[in-house]
Structures are given as structure tokens and as C-alpha cells.
Amino acid sequence: SKNVAEEFVNGKFTDPEVQARYEKYLKKKAKQGKTPREPLDWKEASDRMAKIRNQGRQYELEKLEEFKKIARDVEEQITIDVVNSKGEIVRTRVDAIGYDKKTGELLIQEYKSSATAPLTKNQLEAFELISKGANGTVVGKGKGIFKGGFEIPPGTNIEVIRPK
């Protein structure tokens, strides 16, 4: 990796794209009223998160290919709304959706690239609501045959797949 002295000069990152991302981060923190990280500390954390995101995406693509072997009409990154008992909308996104080639059953999968990567608060709530009988609805344009308004049948299991 580059020498830190070359990476950050006169209070700015030498890479304009990195500087733009840092400025965006500073604005976000100011809006939240929170203290931002020092530039090099932020860069290290940002690089670490980018590596984790990249690892997650690679795992997702690998699992998606496996899913396509057992499912038809496969689409990825589908946003779903579920209404909880308080009448509030819980919105989440699932990694893959398709129909089982053998049974015709709707299959939904969520991929986590580590044994410890947590589900988000909304994933936990939405997945539980659907498995216990709530309706899920695809929102936005949707993709393929899973257009906006497509109903996820109550009781549909959402399989969370992690590395062994």
C-alpha cells in the first residue's frame, strides 16, 4: 500500500475520489451531530468495510449460481415490505428469490459471507413475520416475474445461508 505521507498531504487525500468520499462522510457526521473520525483512521475503516462488502458480494455471486441450479426465474436484490402488528411497514431486501425447479415452491435466500455476520434489525423482523404468517409484498419495480406488488405467501421460509 501507498506510503501514508503520499496519501494525505496538506490536510487532504491526494486521491480526489477518496477526498470526495471523506467530505461526504464529514457532511453526514455533521448532520448527525456526531464527531467524525480523523482522516487516516476513517480511511483505514473505510478500506476495511470495502473489503468486507467485496467479500460479501463475491460470496453472494457464488451462492446465486448454486441457487440457479435448483431454482428457476431467479432474481436477486428484491425489496420486500411486511406490515407488523403495529401496522408499521418493515422494509428489507433479500439476496435471491426464485421457484424450486422440482416442487414449484417459492424459495427465498439471504447470504451472509461469515458465520457471525448479523441479519439487520429489519431482516430479523421481516423474516420472522413472513415465516409466522404475515404477507410480504415486493416493492418498487421489482425484477423479472417478481414485479412490484408480487405477494410473498405467508409462511414462506427465508433461508439464511452462511459458509460452513
Image (cartoon, rainbow, N blue to C red):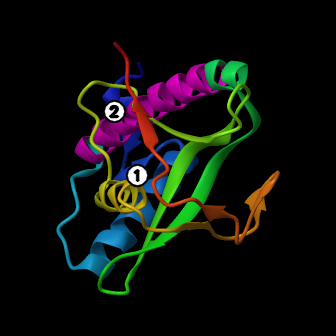
Q: Which mark is residue 12?
A: 1
Amino acid tagged 1: Lys
Query: Which callout, 2 or 1, points to the residue nearer the camera?
Result: 2
Residue under numbered circle 2: 48
* Residue 37 image position (x, y, % from top left): 21, 55
* Residue 11 image position (x, y, % from top left): 34, 53
Up the image or down, 4 lies above or below 76; here it is: above
Quadrant of the image occupied by residue 72? top right
Amino acid tagged 2: Arg
Whether residue 141 sits left or right of residue 52 in the image: it is: right
Q: Residue at (21%, 79%) from the top-left corner? A: 33
Verify whether residue 52 appears in magenta.
yes
Whether residue 53 sits left or right of residue 148 in the image: it is: left
Question: Which residues are the magenta region?
Answer: 41-65
Mark 2 / mark 1, whichever is N-terminal: 1
Label 2 secondary element: helix
Given residues 1 and 89, the one toward you in this image is 89
Verify whether residue 44 appears in magenta.
yes
Up the image or down, 2 lies above or below 32; here it is: above
Given residues 7 and 80, the one toward you in this image is 80
Whether residue 38 sits left or right of residue 148 in the image: it is: left
